[in-house]
Image (spheres, coloured by chain):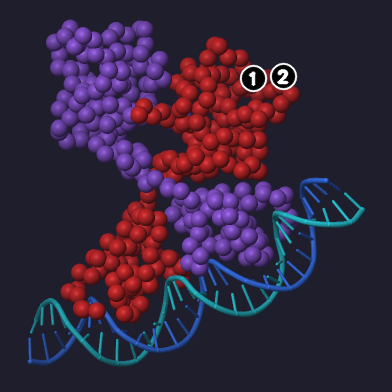
Chain colours: A purple, B red, C blue, D cyan
Amino acid sequence: MAYSPPGQMRERVYRFFRERALDGEPPTVREVQEAFGFRSVNAARRHLEALVADGRLDKRPGRARGYRLTGLVPPAQQVPVLGRVQAGALTTAVEDLDGYVPVEAGVAEECFALRVQGESMRDAGILPGDLVIVRRQDTANDGDIVVALVGDEATVKRLRRRQGRVELHPENPDFEPIVVEDHGEFVGILGKVIEVRRRLV
Amino acid sequence: MAYSPPGQMRERVYRFFRERALDGEPPTVREVQEAFGFRSVNAARRHLEALVADGRLDKRPGRARGYRLTGLVPPAQQVPVLGRVQAGALTTAVEDLDGYVPVEAGVAEECFALRVQGESMRDAGILPGDLVIVRRQDTANDGDIVVALVGDEATVKRLRRRQGRVELHPENPDFEPIVVEDHGEFVGILGKVIEVRRRLV
DNA sequence: TGACAATGTGAACATTTGTACACTATACTG
DNA sequence: CAGTATAGTGTACAAATGTTCACATTGTCA
């Protein structure tokens, strides 16, 4: 095999190893060898050992498939994406399941995801079509971005507490704040938005 | 070892195996043997083979640590979060790893994540501190949002092709487009932004 | 109770996989 | 341009690990 500039092949080996390890199957020395076409096992092994010495890989000496990624790869959990959210969604069963999205475990407890409709939160960088990850809770602090049920419709707004009143503020001058007292309709907080995601195809 | 009622020990073996596998390290036949105090490797092996026959485990015959969980075709894959991105990031440079984030399986091939700095893409809803998921590729189409290396710095911009020229457009009137010819510096495309994420604590 | 299948023991064997050592080739630096 | 650290080759060995075969033990059920 052609000789590579120092460090360059090491990087490629590391990325190959990481790809495979994140797929759940850390490669063996010989699998690395074959992947890069080394004629000697030792070429692959040298790179792996160097990566261990650099602290970029871990290993259990002697064990088969003993090389590992360093650090913790946080386990992921799936969170349901709800199509529509209707009154009573706090307690009743999931209405309209629209798939799942992965979230880091730990924050996934009591969460659901929701697709954003409308431009009312545009200036907060929340656009139509975005997916918001929501932690279920029925109260929220001033300044939190929440999903609230206004009448029959779930809406994403920033919650403001003003002199004891609760207001739902859009982040777009074209829209008006919703003040709870002004409103005959039921207003309930479904949860707090903890993450915003946008797919760009 | 005491003889167990049929199927009972099998269940315990499965749970043990699953625990270890979810930890990222599926046990070997002998590790199962030791965990349960079998005096023979074969006792452990029988259970594992039976679990495979039941479709509860998978295996690659002959390979070390070849038994795997089935069904758990993980719907999520982990993608590395890179701290700084340097010149040569596509192949040469040593990455500055900053953890992992879960991404829907299927899109995770050849991807990495990057934290956004600066306000230049504000009007596209990409804010400082956001995490962009990037698919590595060295070309992109007109209109794609890309991560490009301008001089020594990685930057997120919208790519425009104008009369054969490549331009990098911000989405914020306070910033100026970068036209490649105007620039003595090296401009290279690292990849295309396929997702934007923002954590709201 | 007796047959039979499932469970467990024991001892090998074959393959996979990590490890070691001696040597050659190339890239980088002063 | 010389020297040295890094990269790669070739070969062999040892430990880890999966596999196989023969036999003993026990639970289950007709």
Percent position of residue B18, x then y: 32, 59
Of A86 and B27, the residue lying toward us: B27
Res B58 → quadrant: bottom left
Above or below residue D18? Residue A191 is above
Left or right, residue A165 beside residue D6: left
Q: Secondary structure at mark 1?
A: strand
Above or below residue A10? Residue A86 is above
The residue positioned 38% from the left and 21% from the top of the image is A126
> Rounded to the nearest whole Å, what is the CA distance between mark 2 and mark 1?
8 Å
Left or right, residue B41 beside residue B110: left
Of A172 and B128, the residue lying toward us: B128
Res A131 seen here: no
Residue at label 1? B178
Identify which amino acid the numbered label 2 is placed on.
Asp
Quadrant where the N terminus of chain A sits is bottom right
Above or below residue B120? Residue B110 is below
Percent position of residue D27, x then y: 14, 78
On residue A44, the disc is none
Label 1 chain ID: B
Residue at label 2? B182
Res A125 → quadrant: top left
Percent position of residue B118, x then y: 53, 21
The residue positioned 64% from the left and 65% from the top of the image is A42
Contact (Cβ within 8 Å) of mark 2 with mark 1: yes
